[in-house]
Amino acid sequence: MNKFISHISKIGWCFDNTYARLPEIMLSRIAPIPVKDPKLVIFNHNLSKELGLNFSVIEDNLLPSIFAGSLLPQESECIAQAYAGHQFGYFTMLGDGRAIVIGEHLSKNNKRFDIQFKGSGKTPYSRNGDGRAALGPMLREYIISEAMHGLGISTTRSLAVVTTGENVIRETPLPGAILTRVAASHIRVGTFQYVTMQDDIKTLKTLFNYTINRHYPELKDTSNQALSLLKIVMEKQIKLVTDWMRVGFIHGVMNTDNMTVSGETIDYGPCAFMDNYNPETVFSSIDQYGRYAYFNQPGITKWNLARFAETLLPLINNDKDKAIDIASKTINSFGTLYKKCWLEMMRKKIGLLGEDSKDENLIIDLLSWMHQNKADYTNTFCFLMNENIQENKIYNNQGFISWKQQWQKRLKLHNNSPEKSLKLMRLVNPLVIARNHKVEEVLKEANNRNLNPFNDFLKVLEKPYEKQTKTNNYQFPAPSSEKKYQTFCGT
Ligand code: AMP
Ligand code: MG
């Protein structure tokens, strides 16, 4: 049985649960299934502070039960959300199969956050799954989502991880765990797809108005709110995918159920950072055809947005043909808008001020050189920022030297100075990313209950653009190996 704690006012929880008021078809009321012996593994003090929470007022021995969801704040209203989604292009009915939103917390500045337990037991949407999660993948989500936050990329956050004291069976028995995920909301493109499948315009309108109120109230005054929503979500997603491309992040499973309307990165399953530059990089073991490869990410974003647009058609115009026409025009503008955003971002990465007609070629030449020479993506930009990096012999290569001459010529244009360029580059080029081999290394230790390497890495990832004492430890590319790094879904 779940118990409720009444001294929430001491912690600072301020619940105002709005999603739970939506039509019953959109959710199931179910609480986290209590676990045997919860133990706190990691807690995010910074995020807790940002949320205006103070867990130090509560006895330490209560924290594991709080973050396992067996001791719930009095005002929580637990729900699993229904949604659908195109998974690798195929439409499926889904829903929170192993996650429960316990409520929406309002922080001091009135920002609203879903508080969700992931790995909290079966729900009506679990299908064949066990509703649980293993420690390794939950810690992996914790460190990568926090790394994304450190990089200044819009993302869901991680407040805590507990072990459950129970094993989960994957290929072998693994320690079970629960992650507390904090998100602006969990409204997905797939949530709209789910409602569209109900063929009930009233519920669609309800979800639509709810989304506008929750995320984009400024659109209420526009003449075609549905079209405005499509445009703003497109804008957010373009910004997001451009940020992913900037740091070499590969989401790995860009199904429509894993795309938020808030524009936050969500679902850290098979994601990973690219090391040597190769546009075709794929890490996910099940992504055989590279649907979600690095360079396909913008195209997939557009494809997902087209699925979102389809759900909005009845709200865009009563005349279906007109609605399709209007929505198509918007979706078709994706390419131009993305290209502009990407070019702006890449210009910053190489410190270019102003615009020049040859900029795109200069950028593509650099990327082609990196591809041909298997240069490390992150470290190449570090090298251009005069950072002292290991394994820099590759930059003595003639191709690179010729490119650099062109680059330096271009740098002089538009009243530029080396200082101005460097300042620009410093803002967008991380010195450190969550490199796969380092993530694996700290997770291995964490699985053996040694969290020190995990915490050291986390600390550096909090400020990836700043040189810290331990930054150097994390800048090495993975030692070359026969074995390709692989990530997995359904962990
Ligand atoms: P994901 O690949 O993590 O986006 O998950 C796709 C769907 O599978 C979602 O509906 C999840 O809730 C569900 N799911 C993933 N893992 C499990 C699990 N262990 N038990 C039940 N449902 C799961
Ligand atoms: Mg998902």
Image (cartoon, rainbow, N blue to C red):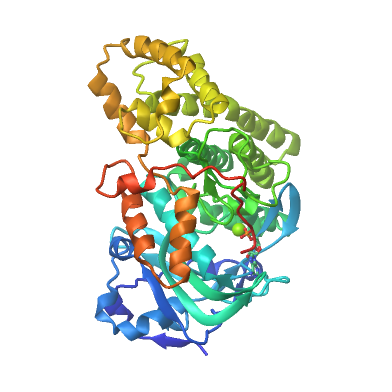
Q: Position of residue 451 (x, y in %)?
A: 38, 67
Which residue appears at 48% of the width and 86% of the height?
37
Q: Is residue 94 left or right of residue 358?
A: right
Q: Please tell me which residue lies in front, 160 or 482.
A: 482
Q: Would you say residue 182 is visible in this rendering? A: no
Does residue 380 lie above or below 400 as drawn? Answer: below
> In the visual, does 158 lie left or right of 314?
left
* Quarter holding ligand 2: bottom right
* Residue in the foreground of this view, choosing between 240 and 129: 129
Q: Place residue 257 in its image quadrant.
A: bottom right
Judging depth in this view, the residue of 26 and 443 nearest the camera is 443
On-image quarter of the C terminus: bottom right
Where on the picture, by quarter, is residue 290? Answer: top right
Q: Nearer the viewer, residue 90 or 140?
A: 140
Residue lying at 31% horizontally and 41% vertically, measured from the top left: 465
Q: Is residue 201 above or below residue 429?
A: below
Percent x, y of residue 354: 36, 16
